[in-house]
Amino acid sequence: MQCPHYDAGRCHSCTLLEIDYPTQVLDKERHVAALLEPVSTGLTWLPAVTGAESGFRNKAKMVVSGTVAAPVLGILDGAGRGVDLTDCGLYPTALEASFGPLAAFVTRANLEPYQVSGRGRRAQQRGELKYLLVTLSPDGELMVRFVLRSQEAVTRIRKHLPWLQAELPALAVASVNIQPAHAAVLEGDLEIPLTERTTLPMRIDDITLDLRPQSFFQTNTAVATELYRQARAWVDEVGPTSLWDLYCGVGGFALHCAAPGRAVTGIEISAEAVVAASGTAERLRAGADGDRFRDVEFAAGDATAFAVGPDARELPEMVIVNPPRRGIGAELAGWLESSGIEHVLYSSCNATTLARDLAAMPTLRPVRGRLLDMFPQTSHYEVLVLLARS
Ligand SMILES: C[S@@+](CC[C@H](N)C(=O)[O-])C[C@H]1O[C@@H](n2cnc3c(N)ncnc32)[C@H](O)[C@@H]1O
C-alpha cells in the first residue's frame, strides 16, 4: 500500500507499510508461534486468515483540529499539529466519502475544534469538538458520534442535523458523547442520542449484530466474519450444552455460537453493549431460527467478578474469552485453571498477554490456533486458540 502521509513522515500508524503483505503475515505467524512456544506441544496451527491490505477499517476515530472555517480531520502530529487523514488508505470508500460532509457540518454548525495550549497548570483549553467517531456497517449505513467537551454545542448540532442527513443519506445513527476531561480517554460516560435510531445493524453471515454507541466492534468486518465462523466451528466440534462468553461486547461470539439446547451467557462491562446484545438476541429469538437463541442471555459486569463470584453457581462446559489488550489477568486465568472446565476458546488481540495468561493455565493446553490478520500494515493481529484440559 502506498501512503503519501507515511512517505512524508506525517503519520506513522502503519508501522509495516514498507514490508510486503505476505511477509507481514509470515512475520506475525512467527511472532505468535515464538510467544506460544513454551505451551505449544500438541498445538496445531491452521493457515492464517488474511484480509484486504487496504480499505478494511470499518471505523474512523478522527481527531478534529484546525478552525471552524477549515477543520482538519485526522490525527495530531508530535508537535500537536493537525494532519488531515481523510484520504487514509485504510478506510473503505464509503467511509472516506463521509468525511467531506462531516467537515462541512463542523463549519455549518459552528463547532470549534478543541485545542489545548500550554502545559501543566498553565494549560488553556478552547473549543468544543474533540473527535468524530464514524462507523460503517456492512450494508453501507453510518453511525456518527461527536465527542464534545461540554453540551454547549448540542442545540446547534440538532438544528443542523437535517442538513447533514440530506448530505449523507447513509447516516443512520448519530449521537453526542460528552468528554469533559482533558484526558487520553477517548470518550465520556454521557451519550446523547440525536437520531431516532440508536443501533447500527452489523450483518455478519446469518447474524445481524446491533451496534450501539459506547460498544466495541471488531475493526475489520471481513476478518471478524472469519473469526466468528472459526469460533462457531470449534465450539460446535466440542459441542457444549452450556457456554460463557466473557468480554462479550455486542455478543458476536455468543450469538454465532448459539445452538438449540445450548445455554449461552455473555458478560460485558459496557452496559450499552449488553443492551445491544440483549436486543439482538430478542430479535433473533422471534425469527425463523429462534430455537437457536432460546437460551441466550447477557448481563453487564466484570468478567472476573462474574466467574469467581457467587452468581456463578453452575459451571459451564466451555468458556470463550475475548479480553482487551491487557488479557484476562492472573485472577481469571487462575480461576479457569482450577475450575475443571474442559474447554476454553481464547481470542486475543495481544499475543504477549495471551502467552502470559496461558502460562498461568498449565492444564488447559492449546490444541488449535489460528492467526487472523485483523490489522494489516501494523504489527497487531488477532489470534484464536482452542484450549483443552490435559
Ligand atoms: C476485544 S473486545 C471484544 C468484544 C466482543 N467479544 C466482540 O467480539 O466484539 C473486549 C471487550 O471487553 C469489554 N471489557 C473490558 N473490560 C472488561 C471487564 N473487566 N469485564 C467484562 N468486559 C470487559 C470491553 O468493553 C469490550 O467490549
Image (spheres, rainbow, N blue to C red):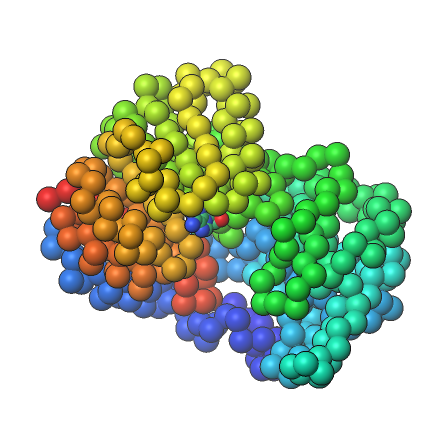
Q: Nearer the viewer, residue 60 or 332?
A: 332
Q: Quadrant of residue 140?
A: top right
Residue projecting furthest to the front: 310
Whether residue 44 is visible to the viewer of this picture, yes or no, is no
In which quadrant is the C terminus drawn? top left
Task: From the top left corner, tell me how far across and down residue 24 is, in percent.
Answer: 37, 67
Which residue is pictured at 35% across the width and 56% down the height? 327
Compared with 18, 256 (above or below) is: above
What number of labels is visible? 0
Whether residue 184 is visible to the viewer of this picture, yes or no, is yes
Q: Quadrant of residue 110?
A: bottom right
Task: From the top left corner, tell me how far across and down residue 361 is, in percent.
Answer: 19, 52
Task: From the top left corner, tell me how far across and down residue 359 is, in percent.
Answer: 20, 58
Task: From the top left corner, tell me how far across and down residue 171 is, in percent.
Answer: 73, 43
Which residue is pictured at 42% across the width and 55% down the height? 324
* 337 on left or right of 142: left
Compared with 244, 105 (above or below) is: below
Q: Nearer the viewer, residue 235 or 213?
A: 213
Q: Quadrant of residue 125?
A: bottom right
Compared with 370, 74 (above or below) is: below
Which residue is pictured at 55% across the width and 23% down the height? 283
Which residue is pictured at 24% across the width and 65% down the height? 35
Compared with 107, 8 (above or below) is: below
